[in-house]
Amino acid sequence: MYLLKPLLSLLLVPQAAQLATIKGIEKLPDNKLTTVNSNGYKIYETAGYNNTSRAFNGLSSAGERQKAGTYFYNLEYNEGGIKKAKTEYLVLKY
């Protein structure tokens, strides 16, 4: 189970398939999500985050299950021709 903190106007919520979804991400297809652990090491990164085939599920980009704990993520996106970024944290619990 994932406990995820709101990302301003976007919201990460768990789905039954245990994917972290970003509400409204379909309106921001030009995006990149990067997740780092508490030591600052990048564990997950994808361009075009889409809540399905490109979604964080607790596994690193290399397919390794991550430990329960606090992680930080940065979502970079293009909205109306303006590049923006939002940074928050999430708590991963099993």
Image (cartoon, rainbow, N blue to C red):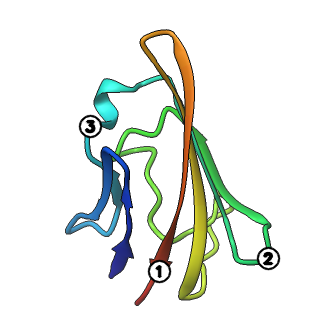
Specify the amino acid type for callout 2.
Answer: Asn
Residue 35 percent location from the top left of the image: 62, 59
Q: What residue type is labelled 3?
A: Gly
- Residue type at mark 1 is Leu
**At 63% across and 65% down in the image, what residue appears?**
60
Res. 92 mark: 1
Q: Distance between the residues labelled 2 and 1?
A: 15 Å
Question: Dot 3 corresponds to which residue?
Answer: 24
Residue 17, given in percent of the width and then of the height, sits at 26, 66
Crowd class of label 3 (few under 14; some 14 to 19; many from 20; radius 10 Å): some
Residue 69 appears at what percent x and percent y? 56, 86
- Rendered image: mark on residue 41: none
- Residue beneath disc 2: 39
Against 2, is 67 above or below?
below
- Which label's residue is closer to the chain start, 3 or 2? 3
Quadrant where the image shows the C terminus: bottom left
What kind of element bears circle 3? loop
Marks 1 and 3, the one that precedes in the sequence: 3
**Splitting the image into 4 quarters, where does residue 19 fall?**
bottom left
Question: Alpha-carbon distance for marks 3 and 2?
Answer: 29 Å
Q: Residue drawn 46% across and 39% down? A: 49
Residue 29: percent from the left, percent from the top? 41, 25
